[in-house]
Amino acid sequence: MIANILLILCGVVLIAYLIDVFSAKIKVPSVVLLLTFGFAIKYSLQLLNIAIPDVSRILPLVGTVGLVLIVLEGALELKIDATKIPLIKKAFWVSWLAILILAVITVSWCYYVFNYSINDSIVNLMPLCIISSAIAIPSAKSFNEINKEFVVYESSFSDIIGVVLFNFFVTTEIINLTAGLKFTSDLIFILIITCLSTIASAVLLYKINTHVKHVPLLALILLVYAITKLLHLPGLIYILILGLVFSNASMFNKFKIFKKVRFDNFNAEVNSFTDLVIEATFLIRILFFTLFGFSLNLDELISTTELPYSIAFVVLIFLSRAVLLHLYKLPLVPVLFVAPRGLITILLFLSVPITSQLPLINKTLLIQMVLLTAFVLIFGGLLNKKSNL
């Protein structure tokens, strides 16, 4: 029995790895091929009359770990200097305004047309308003440095802002001054936790001389994030800041308190830790999309009831995105086409409380949004390749 489980698990991972590599060669987002792979496994088992295991319970766990690792990987790859501050500001405002525009229009539509409550509409629609850094960041690796950094910052900000707003509306039934004060106090609290945890993580990485230090550090980071989740705090802020501090540690050598720190040694440890994060992120990402594809049903994929809504939402995404990019004087090609929905979208959708779920915002609509934005991403990649010839 154990040998069979190992055979299946290792085989799935290796095939998913080949799919991921192949997707990069043909410029097709790996999410499309991995979802198809997971879907194909399920129906192959059905044809062989093998019992189909229920994977819905482990999807949120795998997705949460994947989200943390993806944001951490993106932050570890970013270098900050004074010349990049304008780009970071633009990425923040584009991500924030994109979420705001999409949320206001779609929530108003749900409220006035279908008479859904504003709170439930926000909770259900917020996952669809967020760019998935799990797909956006790998897709931008072939872009020039400025465009790549913008996509990394924008998608990371989109994840963080979206998760913060989602958690706020899930835990807040009535929006008033008390709710606003609680939200502000939560932000202050997470910044305090971030400072203390980042210092502890840096000391662990720098001071411990044993051969095994990166896995305990990763466990500590996930532990702190889990604590913030239990406290309903925006833990992704901690992940982003920690990654940025680690990747830009040399900036602190001008402060007297850090004069005794050998930043060359610390940076070497950060590089090794980054390698571990990249490997772990890859494993979790391919497992999540394969498992989610495995959880899909044929009826959900071929349904046309939700298709007009999906297309309308995607058109709204890219129209508003084009306006914002033009407003902030950013290139339309290839950045315009990098607004995929993926891991964060699915994860938040699975986190919507049963009492708040809306019939219109279902798994079929979700999958159609993921696939449509992936196809737009493919089209943008072709345009970018053509413009570079």
Image (cartoon, rainbow, N blue to C red):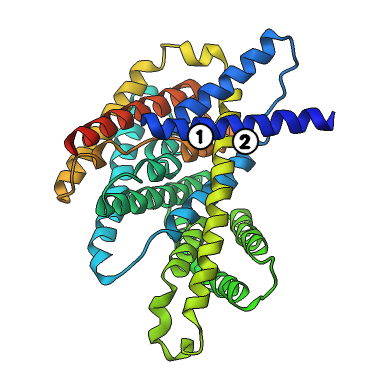
Out of 346 and 373, give the one closest to the viewer. 373
Give the residue number, with chain letter if any, for mark 2.
Answer: 59
- Residue 352 appears in the picture as rendered: no
- Distance from disc 2 to disc 1, alpha carbons, whole Å, reads 9 Å
The amino acid type found where label 1 is placed reads: Ile
**Residue 371: x %, y % from top left:** 41, 25
SS type, badge 2: helix
**Mark 1 falls on what kind of element?**
helix
Q: Residue at (31%, 39%) from the top-left corner?
A: 338
Quadrant of the frame with the N terminus: top right
> Relative to 193, is 386 on the left or the right?
left
Q: Residue at x 38, y 77 (%)?
A: 251
Q: Residue 4, relative to residue 260: is it above or below?
A: above
Residue 381 image-quadrant placement: top left
Give the x, y percent position of residue 314. 31, 28
Q: With 237 as the anchor, is 339 left or right in this view?
A: left
Seen at 18% across and 48% down, the residue is 330
| Picture layout, residue 204 above or below residue 343 | below
Where is residue 86 shown, x and y percent of the image? 23, 62
- Left/right of residue 2 with respect to residue 296 in the rendered view: right
Dot 2 and dot 1 residues touching (CB under 8 Å): yes
Q: Residues within 10 Å of mark 2 (few under 14, many from 20)?
A: some
* Quarter the C terminus occupies: top left
Is residue 147 among what the camera can see?
yes
Residue in view at x 37 percent, y 38 percent:
129
Q: Residues within 10 Å of mark 1 (few under 14, many from 20)?
A: many
Left or right, 168 with respect to 57, comes to left
Instruction: Indicate which disc, 2 or 1, sits on the residue closer to the N terminus.
Output: 2
Residue 102, quarter of picture: top left
Question: Residue 376: horizontal and vertical position, in percent?
Answer: 30, 28
Q: Which residue is mark 1?
A: 346
